[in-house]
Amino acid sequence: MAANSMFFTATSSILTKPIIKIQSFSTPSFGFSKNTSVLAHRVCAGKQFLAVAAAASSAVEVEADTAVIKASKVLPFRVGHGFDLHRLEPGYPLIIGGIDIPFEKGCEAHSDGDVLLHCVVDAILGALGLPDIGQIFPDNDPKWKGARSSVFIKEAVRLMDEAGYELGNLDATLILQRPKLSPHKETIRNNLSLLLGADPSVVNLKAKTHEKVDSLGENRSIAAHTVVLLMKK
């Protein structure tokens, strides 16, 4: 007498769970009833089926992990934005982009208070998906007291190079009521390009007043915004 028995095959793909395909075919039951034969076959094949299913499941896990790794591969380009603001107070030097600007006020800060360089560092770190400048160079660490911000820029450039990127282009905007930066813009831009190891043609610098509105417009503070595009080498 013939009886139905179960045959299991497992297939899997990277995007789907293991699929169990069930086929039926006839085999001798050796005198057992149909239900008993099926049960006996299931018991005998149980270990083999579990092994196949486990292997299929492992394969799916491995391939899924591979897919996650591939999804987080190095991007051909990255974009970052930086912002910084410092209070202006008498008795401090005003340093912008590594250049000393003659003025009766300067930035009150733990380091040299270079609002532009701090902003550029944050933009690069942001593009790389790294912590901000305050975490890497904390303002409660005595070794950064009065430090030149060129040190921070050099570290950001090192991290960028280590990650396999170079500067595509940079666009920065300084916001301050006074002093007028027109006479200093080219000097600042050229020095910033030098610190970044970039051609001046990919570094842009703009300066705006704040129309005498709030602390920026009242000449009590200075701010900067920077956007950078990093390209894979």
Image (cartoon, rainbow, N blue to C red):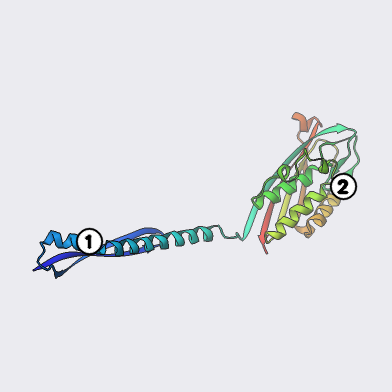
Cα distance, mark 1 to mark 2? 82 Å
The residue closer to the viewer here, 158 or 94, is 158
Q: Residue at x 30, y 62 (%)?
A: 47
Residue 166 visible? The answer is no
Q: Quadrant of the C terminus?
A: bottom right
The residue closer to the viewer here, 210 or 150, is 150
- Residue 187 appears at what percent x and percent y? 86, 51
- Residue 51 appears at what percent x and percent y? 34, 63
- State the image quarter where residue 222 is shown: top right
Q: Residue at x 60, y 60 (%)?
A: 74
Q: Secondary structure at mark 1?
A: helix
- Residue 123 appears at what percent x and percent y? 70, 48
Residue on which disc 2 sits:
99
The residue closer to the viewer here, 203 or 36, is 36
Q: Residue at x 69, y 50 (%)?
A: 125
Three-letter amino acid code at disc 1?
Arg
Three-letter amino acid code at disc 2?
Ile
Q: Is residue 152 left or right of residue 102?
A: left
Q: Residue at x 71, y 57 (%)?
A: 160
Question: Mark 1 against mark 2, which lies toward the viewer?
Answer: 1
- State the image quarter where residue 43 is shown: bottom left
Q: Quadrant of the N terminus?
A: bottom left
Q: Is residue 65 left or right of residue 165?
A: left
Q: Are marks 1 and 2 in contact (CB under 8 Å)?
A: no
Q: Is residue 103 left or right of residue 41?
A: right
Return the disc, 1 or 2, that comes first in the chain's sequence: 1
- Residue 138 appears at what percent x and percent y? 75, 41
Residue on which disc 1 sits:
42
- Please tell me how crowded label 1 is: few (under 14), some (14-19), or many (20+) other residues with Cα within 10 Å: some
Residue 74 visible? The answer is yes
